[in-house]
């Protein structure tokens, strides 16, 4: 088998993540080709091909509401090409749910190495687990708001301070009155909040 052809086919598989292309040259010059869509998520094997660390870090710093940790920069770089990476905040899922979402995004054109997809998956599973209950915005501590809703430390402290000074929140509109709190950050989490 021609080494260049193997490299080319390997490269095509790693970049598309959706289609495997195989070519086999058998005796007499007969060429057999095959392609098949892959159903399983592409999370194993290829080395990372990441952007320069400084550039990636700068982009990640634009999203302080995303928890720090391994995989944050990769989420910002890969997912941020098509939509705001903060979309994940309001959509906690199980591991299988995140695998399905990542596979769907890869099918829609997201490109990354297998190692980068694994980093993204582990980051999302750790920081945005499936939500089994809503957060009561009138009883939650600042720590609860950080861990369960993904607010930054400052945002969570501001919410609690405002609630302490002005009384309980009655609706999402009341919550949006907290100074320096981005309305879109609040709206993206509305399905995970309750005001009892």
Image (spheres, helix red, strand yellow):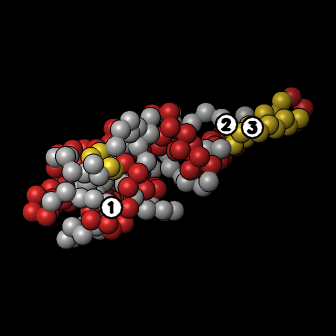
**Horizontal relation, residue 153 to residue 38: left or right:** left
Nearest to the observer: residue 35 or residue 144:
144
In this orientation, does residue 55 appear?
no
Q: Which residue is mark 1?
A: 172
Disc 3 to disc 2, how far (Cα)? 6 Å
- Percent across and percent down for residue 74 are 39, 51
Q: Which residue is mark 2?
A: 38
Residue at 39% in and 58% down: 188
Mark 2 vs mark 1: give the one in front: 1
Q: Secondary structure at mark 1?
A: helix
User: Looking at the image, do the residues carrying marks 3 and 2 touch, with CB atoms under 8 Å apart?
Assistant: yes
Mark 2: few/some/many CA within 10 Å (<14, 14-19, 20+): few
Mark 1: few/some/many CA within 10 Å (<14, 14-19, 20+): some
Q: Which mark is residue 36?
A: 3
Q: Quadrant of the N terminus?
A: top right
Nearest to the observer: residue 43 or residue 169:
169
């Amino acid at each position: 088998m021609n080494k260049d052809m193997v490299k080319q086919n390997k490269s095509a598989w790693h970049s598309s993540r959706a289609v495997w292309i195989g070519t086999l040259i058998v005796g007499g010059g007969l060429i057999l080709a095959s392609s098949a869509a892959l159903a399983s998520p592409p999370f194993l094997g290829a080395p990372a091909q990441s952007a320069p660390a400084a550039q990636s870090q700068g982009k990640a710093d634009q999203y302080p509401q995303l928890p720090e940790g391994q995989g944050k920069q990769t989420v910002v770089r890969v997912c941020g090409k098509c939509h705001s990476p903060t979309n994940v905040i309001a959509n906690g899922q199980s591991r299988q749910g995140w695998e399905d979402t990542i596979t769907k995004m890869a099918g829609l054109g997201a490109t990354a190495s297998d190692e980068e997809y694994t980093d993204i998956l582990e980051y999302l599973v750790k920081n945005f687990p499936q939500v089994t209950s809503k957060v009561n915005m009138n009883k939650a501590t600042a720590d609860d708001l950080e861990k369960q809703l993904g607010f930054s430390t400052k945002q969570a402290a501001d919410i609690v301070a405002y609630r302490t000074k002005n009384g309980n929140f009655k609706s999402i509109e009341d919550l949006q009155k907290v100074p320096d709190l981005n309305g879109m950050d609040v709206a993206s989490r509305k399905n995970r909040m309750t005001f009892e």
